[in-house]
């Protein structure tokens, strides 16, 4: 079971948070393979053209799924990390705002996009990435994540985009 490879780290990054550490899963070849195949298998590969993955662990799973399915991959990063012209989307945090960026040519109008990340919590990062895809004229067809913290109701921020998870807490 994939859950057996997720380690709880209490009070990280601050008191009261129980961090879901995926490092043991990444270290185990069979578990990593199961996770990549599960994320990839959640959505019909003919329904999308590209995969967008968010910094930083979304890069791990997004590129692996893209390779597994023969699709292209697009990185979504914090501001100032990408070398070419970018577009930006701000999103709300518990206290303040943050932003994500991708290249202005990350996808073409009408291209269908699968969004991949390791964790869905409050939904801010995923919602911002969905907004970036739409700003570029792309079509977000689904989100596929390894872990969802269901008690935070993150998927409620983008009810029009189907969301698939392998592990739900």
Image (cartoon, rainbow, N blue to C red):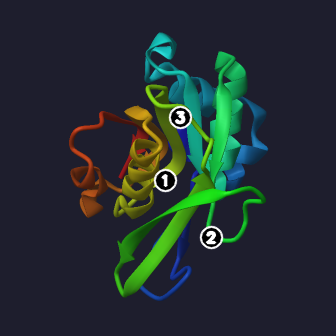
Could you tell me which secondary element the residue under label 2 belongs to?
A: loop
Q: Is residue 69 above or below residue 86?
A: above
**Spatial distance from mark 1 to mark 2, Cα to Cα?**
20 Å
Q: How many neighbours does mark 1 have within 10 angstroms: few (below 14), some (14-19), or many (20 or more)? A: many
Give the image location of residue 10, x and y in percent: 51, 77
* Residue 31 placement (x, y as % from top left): 66, 34
Residue 97 visible in rendering? yes
Dot 1: what SS?
Answer: strand
116 sits to left or right of 59: left
As measured in the structure, the alpha-carbon distance from the residue carrying label 3 to the one carrying label 1 is: 17 Å
- Rendering coords of residue 128 (x, y %): 41, 58
Which one is earlier in the sequence, the residue at label 2 or at label 3? 3
Helix, strand or loop at disc 3?
loop
The answer to whether marks 3 and 1 mark residues whose Cβ atoms lie closer than 8 Å is no
Is residue 48 shown left or right of residue 151? right
Residue drawn at x 39%, y 43% as measured from the top left: 134
Quarter of the image for residue 161 reads: top left
At 73% from the left and 60% from the top, the residue drawn is 82
Question: Of the residues under marks 1 and 2, which one precedes in the sequence?
Answer: 2
Percent coordinates x, y for residue 39 in the rendering = 52, 30
Q: CA distance from mark 2 to mark 3?
A: 36 Å
Toward the viewer: 13 or 77? 77
Name the side, left or right, on which 158 lies relative to 26. left
Find disc 1 in the rendering and name its residue: 119
**What residue sits right under mark 3 in the picture?**
1
Any mark on residue 79, and which?
2
User: Crowdedness of circle 2 by 10 Å Cα count: few (<14), some, many (20+)?
Assistant: some
């Amino acid at each position: 079971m994939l859950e057996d490879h997720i380690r709880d780290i209490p009070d990280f990054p601050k008191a009261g948070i129980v961090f879901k550490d995926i490092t043991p899963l990444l270290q185990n070849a069979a578990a990593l393979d199961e996770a990549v195949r599960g994320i990839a298998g959640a959505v019909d590969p003919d329904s999308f053209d590209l995969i967008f993955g968010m910094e930083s662990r979304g890069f791990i799973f997004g590129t692996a799924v893209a390779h597994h399915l023969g699709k292209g991959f697009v990185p979504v990063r914090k501001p100032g990390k990408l070398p070419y012209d970018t577009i930006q989307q701000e999103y709300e945090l518990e206290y303040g705002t943050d932003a994500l960026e991708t290249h202005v040519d990350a996808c073409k109008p009408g291209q269908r996009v699968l969004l991949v990340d390791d964790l869905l919590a409050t939904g801010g990062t995923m919602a911002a990435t969905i907004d970036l895809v739409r700003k570029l004229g792309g079509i977000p067809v689904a989100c596929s994540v390894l872990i969802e913290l269901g008690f935070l109701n993150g998927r409620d921020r983008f009810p029009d985009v189907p969301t698939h998870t392998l592990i739900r807490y």
